[in-house]
Image: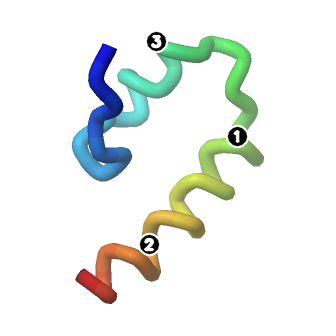
Amino acid sequence: MPHAPIRAVSLDGLLALNPHLTLADILALWRWTGPSERLH
């Protein structure tokens, strides 16, 4: 399965791929991907 860019994955998609994600995990992903969006 090809690794899709995180920015192309919706919140619902993340939960569908891993229903065990917690809100903290999701917030951590958002904080991690946020700055990288500005760098590109």
Residue 32 shown left or right of residue 39 in the figure = right
Residue 23 shown left or right of residue 7 in the figure = right
Q: Residues within 10 Å of mark 2 (few under 14, many from 20)?
A: few
Residue type at mark 2: give it.
Gly
Mark 2 or mark 1, earlier in chain = 1
**Nearer to the camera, 4 or 32:** 4
Q: Which residue is drawn at 67% across and 57% down?
A: 28
Which element type, helix, strand or loop, lies under badge 1? Answer: helix
Quarter in which the N terminus is drawn: top left
- Kindly identify which numbered label has been placed on residue 23: 1
Q: Name the residue under label 3.
A: 16
Q: Nearer the viewer, mark 2 or mark 1?
A: 2
The number of callouts visible is 3
Q: Is residue 38 above or below residue 24?
A: below
Q: Which residue is drawn at 30% across and 85% down?
A: 38
Mark 3 or mark 1, earlier in chain = 3
Residue type at mark 1: give it.
Leu
Q: In this view, does 32 lie above or below 37?
A: above
Instruction: Give the CA distance from mark 2 to mark 1.
Output: 16 Å
Q: Mark 2 points at which residue?
A: 34
Which element type, helix, strand or loop, lies under badge 2? Answer: helix
